[in-house]
Amino acid sequence: MEKAEHLLSNLYFEDIDYAHIDHHRAIRKGFPEVIFGQGKTSMQIIGIMETMMTRDNIILATRVDKDKAVKIQKKIKNIEYDEEARLIQLKQKEPEITGNGEILVISAGTSDIPVAKEALLTAKAMGNKTKSIYDVGVAGIHRLFAHKDIIEAASVIIAVAGMEGALPSVIAGMVKAPVLAVPTSIGYGTSFNGLTALFGMLNSCSSNISVVNIDNGFGAGYMASAINHT
Amino acid sequence: MEKAEHLLSNLYFEDIDYAHIDHHRAIRKGFPEVIFGQGKTSMQIIGIMETMMTRDNIILATRVDKDKAVKIQKKIKNIEYDEEARLIQLKQKEPEITGNGEILVISAGTSDIPVAKEALLTAKAMGNKTKSIYDVGVAGIHRLFAHKDIIEAASVIIAVAGMEGALPSVIAGMVKAPVLAVPTSIGYGTSFNGLTALFGMLNSCSSNISVVNIDNGFGAGYMASAINHT
Amino acid sequence: MEKAEHLLSNLYFEDIDYAHIDHHRAIRKGFPEVIFGQGKTSMQIIGIMETMMTRDNIILATRVDKDKAVKIQKKIKNIEYDEEARLIQLKQKEPEITGNGEILVISAGTSDIPVAKEALLTAKAMGNKTKSIYDVGVAGIHRLFAHKDIIEAASVIIAVAGMEGALPSVIAGMVKAPVLAVPTSIGYGTSFNGLTALFGMLNSCSSNISVVNIDNGFGAGYMASAINHT
Amino acid sequence: MEKAEHLLSNLYFEDIDYAHIDHHRAIRKGFPEVIFGQGKTSMQIIGIMETMMTRDNIILATRVDKDKAVKIQKKIKNIEYDEEARLIQLKQKEPEITGNGEILVISAGTSDIPVAKEALLTAKAMGNKTKSIYDVGVAGIHRLFAHKDIIEAASVIIAVAGMEGALPSVIAGMVKAPVLAVPTSIGYGTSFNGLTALFGMLNSCSSNISVVNIDNGFGAGYMASAINHT
Amino acid sequence: MEKAEHLLSNLYFEDIDYAHIDHHRAIRKGFPEVIFGQGKTSMQIIGIMETMMTRDNIILATRVDKDKAVKIQKKIKNIEYDEEARLIQLKQKEPEITGNGEILVISAGTSDIPVAKEALLTAKAMGNKTKSIYDVGVAGIHRLFAHKDIIEAASVIIAVAGMEGALPSVIAGMVKAPVLAVPTSIGYGTSFNGLTALFGMLNSCSSNISVVNIDNGFGAGYMASAINHT
Amino acid sequence: MEKAEHLLSNLYFEDIDYAHIDHHRAIRKGFPEVIFGQGKTSMQIIGIMETMMTRDNIILATRVDKDKAVKIQKKIKNIEYDEEARLIQLKQKEPEITGNGEILVISAGTSDIPVAKEALLTAKAMGNKTKSIYDVGVAGIHRLFAHKDIIEAASVIIAVAGMEGALPSVIAGMVKAPVLAVPTSIGYGTSFNGLTALFGMLNSCSSNISVVNIDNGFGAGYMASAINHT
Amino acid sequence: MEKAEHLLSNLYFEDIDYAHIDHHRAIRKGFPEVIFGQGKTSMQIIGIMETMMTRDNIILATRVDKDKAVKIQKKIKNIEYDEEARLIQLKQKEPEITGNGEILVISAGTSDIPVAKEALLTAKAMGNKTKSIYDVGVAGIHRLFAHKDIIEAASVIIAVAGMEGALPSVIAGMVKAPVLAVPTSIGYGTSFNGLTALFGMLNSCSSNISVVNIDNGFGAGYMASAINHT
Amino acid sequence: MEKAEHLLSNLYFEDIDYAHIDHHRAIRKGFPEVIFGQGKTSMQIIGIMETMMTRDNIILATRVDKDKAVKIQKKIKNIEYDEEARLIQLKQKEPEITGNGEILVISAGTSDIPVAKEALLTAKAMGNKTKSIYDVGVAGIHRLFAHKDIIEAASVIIAVAGMEGALPSVIAGMVKAPVLAVPTSIGYGTSFNGLTALFGMLNSCSSNISVVNIDNGFGAGYMASAINHT
């Protein structure tokens, strides 16, 4: 068996020295490998994208700052880059809508929008209908309640908040749908770069809620899509 | 409007001095309020259960240790108590299966079983088909792969692990389905009562994953059910 | 000057070996010294109370558990002891109402009541009108809004919450009055014995809010009274 | 009721895409929304200010660094900008004195002055009489006692300190008035950017004291004003 | 040389299986080895004391709780045990006064006395004149100033405080002498078992100050004696 | 291949409901699975031992406290139990010496002996020659140098220390051999249950050193054996 | 003896004012002192290298960033500098292979390569055969299993991973050989600059594993060489 | 008394708006106020120096980086600036030697020298004889022992170390004199900018030791002088 395993698994991925590109992932996971841009050089990102382009319909690279993006755009045609979300997309064709319902992204403050947008664009790229509401934090909670109909209609909700991170709890208390809470690093002092928001969300007294890493808009969008495709 | 709001909301809940029982929750959330047993006296739990019994088909009380459970069982008939999961259930009739697919609970070690069981019983009580696999941690990863078919068939997976908390990452890498990671407080030294497992799970290099609080089997079961009912 | 300072300050307090009792405090601060019971023996508490009784109209001792309280009650007559709040009171006569408005104590959960009660009894003992609302946390936020009139009528609000600690933010967003936030140690896992609630409250996106130490119901009641006497 | 709530709440705020401006706040809270400048672009701040200008008498924007302030001043006339306090003010007319007594701001060190000034200017803008004493930390405590008369005359005291943060405790021990403690991020090593000062203040052995977030001069000024208007 | 080193060092200590008793220490350090009682069985403490008794004039064992002390007293005659300080002393004759000046121990609160006493008894045992003042914390700072003459007369001051730990800073600001700050674990919530006091002391804005571990009265007494013998 | 994998892996382990016993481990790893006793009931430990006894020559169970050990000894014959090390051993026959050199265990203090013994017994059980030196911490460093010959002769050194954890650094500076550092939870205050020792060891300025978890004597013994068998 | 010690030890090292160069280390430890470049000026590094060059066959300087390296290369001929690994090497002649087996370096992600390379180059410089596999993290675990033969053949394995740091656990579960785990600072949010990976590795449920400091590729290579030379 | 206190204390200090200069300090403390340069502008430092120059023989300003120093030197003549120690000195005449013995400063590594020098220059400025030994860390402990005579002759020892911070423990074990331990922020990963060294020093198993804040060379020099003047 070890032999068979060895042979077969060679087909699963391609070794380009600094990376093992996982071609099997689109089959196994329903979506190709996504490139985590942080800590990679623009040359490495280009190399990985060129290897993937031969097989995959859509390529995402996250956490790509503007400098790297400009270098990548010079080498690879037809890239879409969203500077706020720091997200690169390369599509052979637009993704079909395959998700069951609608994914709603809500942010507590204006400063949380970049993370919210990373979630939104990821969910869209993975074949989901999406909608967004921004700047409806708990200090003026009537702003949130004004959107009650949209909130109750969503299949999956992504709630993005920094500082005390109370928004996801309040939303989860209003609906049946699963809520994905995304803490952001917005704040100062004891916000601890998002840790306080994260811990607040993990301690939510609502229960239809789970949490992703700080500023991980991508992960929230990906998980929301997984839920929306069950 | 404030007047209307005031009048209506009085119907939503019942004030029994030490608790505001949220009768509206079964309508709004699809499941009645669940009693968080920790920090409440057995008398308070009994009082809340008796108020709820008049309206709700199923009542859950979590984190009820054996001493309290015995006292509650003396006052209220037909209670089911699972000592390992520390969960009380009171059902007028068995819940119907209303969830779409099957929820699978996997634990890394034998010591993680109590948390896994709390998740399992919660998901069952909320109308879901469930299955479980225990003690398949990453130190002998072939044990996990032996259950590949069951794992790939699940709609939602709850992965429970203490210590380094690596199991959910590996599972999420194998499947398309959403994975709910539950860190447990099993371990010593730098396990920090589950904090290391929690942080490991939040940093998973897989993306179809989100996390609940340490030892929060109940929350994982509840969120899994919310996902399984979308 | 040093001499004068030396002479005068000897009148300010009495040295009973293990304690310097600050007789000047009732004049300087408007209320006699309050005994912090934790870490003191019942004999020490009795000794301090007996020294104070000769001068002060009302004596409070906080964080006195039941065992100590029983011993103290055997030695000193007419003590009132609230077991939940762990508070001892000894009054020559009932305190007059001297505060300007009403102090309202709100708690998020049933388990937060002991801390809420410590705040309430302290504020009462210091000459304030008080009111309380319990178990109106953010997971069913309509329960809170139902009490809108009482909330808007208060001069000072003490908001007590554990877990994610979001309640004070929401309340402070509703009113003009100052809100004192009290984090409690209720919760588990990443609630870190109240630290998460504390940090959440310090990061409130509302601004008419300030915070006291975890489980410090006494401090909240005292500060509320100071505010209500300006 | 849901319908009415929906209609009415639309009047409360204005949605300008990246922000929901809360026009109801001046009525509900006695002061218009204050713009948190950190994490917002100068274009976003300008947009929000322009929307607010049509209705509100005074607009504050906090945590605006010099670069942003210069850009904003080019677009909006008559802005006052305090570089040390990083505060923008736009006033139709000077605020009337509506507060009951005087708010006193005391800082422990020269380096704490920027935070102290943010508190002072906020309190002034909200209609309060104010006074300040700077650089009277506990290492030469006679400097503090020299100002005893001013300190005892204040209605509300804001005490600003970094490093060990001991000043508010000593001040609160001297007076009846409520003391708002503001930790600053001044210090090095185990000052942990103000965390040590914060924790020291939360553990004050004086009781007429409560605390705001690290470097949150604005919050202290706002809360002091709320207290001074009860 | 290695040979010589090997031979000689054998004379320095005695190996009794579970301990290497350092007979050279009285010569090298001016005081015999002190037994750290925590984590040792009473049998081990007895064994070490019996080995030392043949050579050393005075033996100290710290952190010995009452149960162990009773067992040790049954085996070894003439032991003095202070339950509050948890200190065992065995003296062939009373230590001579060899220190230059007087060591003064000051505690902020009644609850800090056990740690203060451990420091006091240690300093006494090592041949120093000592004095103490208890319960003069910063919330009523005139109590401290009343003892100004004694404070200014001391050679070395040990200042013991829990909670916010501000006392040593204030004292060090008053004198030329070196101040040893001892944080205690007295407090709750964000006192973090003495960590807040420790960090406050390390950040003192006075400079003739240094710090020992939390509750380390013994270390403070020992260091004070070392200073008093220079 | 997936089929083959599935079939084969069933042979690797045995599923006894609450545990998957990994029979393949003795082949793959050179030593059978070791039972982690903490968090398991005595019945579960007995069940696992009985399943293993049919195949494995030696069974270890770690972190078994006395109560559980007594219950297990009643059910399973010929168990050796070391109470200090909390270790159960069940051997069909004594292990042969298969390791290349000698493993030396050194502890800094008397209180570190239980962890040191767990390491020693584990290394012995895995077929290694072992030796130990106890109570040679850095406060009297000549005690350590007296054992220089033994230290330089060892193949692998396990250095066990609590408090400041400096011993492994000093030892590693003396020899060529690999040093495994084991922090213990001995200490108080800022020892943080071994965290300070752990971090000190990770920051060693010597380089032939690596670290295991706090109090993990078993892991150190196991890793030392792995090194001694290369 | 003290005299002899004094005389002899003067031969052991050379004092060049800002450094004591330890010439005895090559004899005592089998490899000359390695220069820790961080926090040293290029002039200091040059000075130390020039002093060492007269005696030692190979000189390593770690954590030397590009700017410093360029300055050093201008002064000292024949330096090899690896920018990714930030490592300077100066060799009189190529090191002989003296280690017993092969050291294998495995990294979880592309971004972990700099740390992996520092380990690899260090091990090579110390006379070991080495091999490497990069980018085989647990999210696509079949990539790892494809290299099973190489992994099982290694004498010592260095496993480098950031984020959740799960790779070393999985590898250690597959082999008998000792595994050195190296956490890297790759990640964001709750990766805490490698702390989460570090703690995960310390809590590994595999036992033939030990850990070095975050990003300490050098230490891992050095320790692996020490193991490979036993 | 309050009046007298008020009058007199005005003589103690001078209020120059942003600073209260404490002229009484030279009398009370034996040394004039020292300017903490961090967080002050060069204009503020100049202002304070000019006010002090009229009265004080020696002025020190710490933590002054090069840019500020250059600006200050343009305004005030005869300043001595040490860039490594970041220390400004302004002397009317050289300080007399008034301390009893000699203060010895020892550093563990080359990178710790800036902190060591700040201590040395402070002690010198305060009238003490001083000596220094650099780069004698515990990884080659014979380098330390070679200086045994100098070490044993010192009245007070300042031991400076980063990383694991073990040096002060070893030194304190060798001598009777008081040892002041100074942790530095040198290191990476789990050195936590000096926190690990600090905690290690606080947990020293030697007892003639106390600790100052991380990188606080100034404080160590000041405290050493206070000790040396008893």
Image: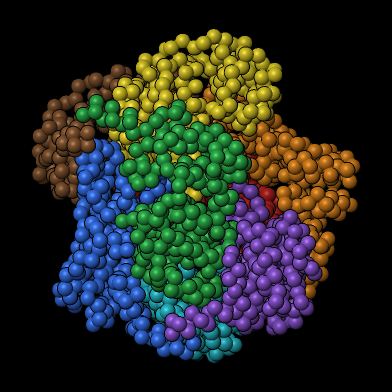
Chain colours: A blue, B green, C yellow, D brown, E orange, F purple, G cyan, H red
Which residue is rendered at x = 35% and y = 82% of the image? A13
Closer to the camera in the image, F20 or C64: F20
Q: Residue furthest front?
A: B93
Numbered label tally: 0
Image quadrant containing the C terminus of chain G: bottom right
Closer to the camera in the image, F95 or D205: F95
Q: Is residue G190 visible?
A: no
Q: Where does the image place residue A136, in percent across and percent down from the top left?
A: 24, 43
Q: Where does the image place residue H40, in percent across and percent down from the top left?
A: 35, 43
Using the image, determine if residue B189 lies above or below residue F145. above
Closer to the camera in the image, G17 or G49: G49
Which residue is rendered at x = 75% and y = 48% of the image? E37
Left or right: C43, with G115 as reference point: right
Left or right: A49, with E32 as reference point: left
Image quadrant containing the N terminus of chain G: bottom right
Which residue is rendered at x = 64% and y = 20% of the image? C48
Q: Where does the image place residue H155, in percent across and percent down from the top left?
A: 65, 49
Closer to the camera in the image, A107 or G32: A107
> Which image quarter: residue A48?
bottom left
Q: Where does the image place residue F64, in percent across and percent down from the top left?
A: 69, 60
> Which image quarter: residue G11?
bottom right
Which residue is rendered at x = 77% and y = 36% of the image? E82
Using the image, determine if residue C26 lies above or below residue H151. above
Q: Is residue A228 visible?
A: yes
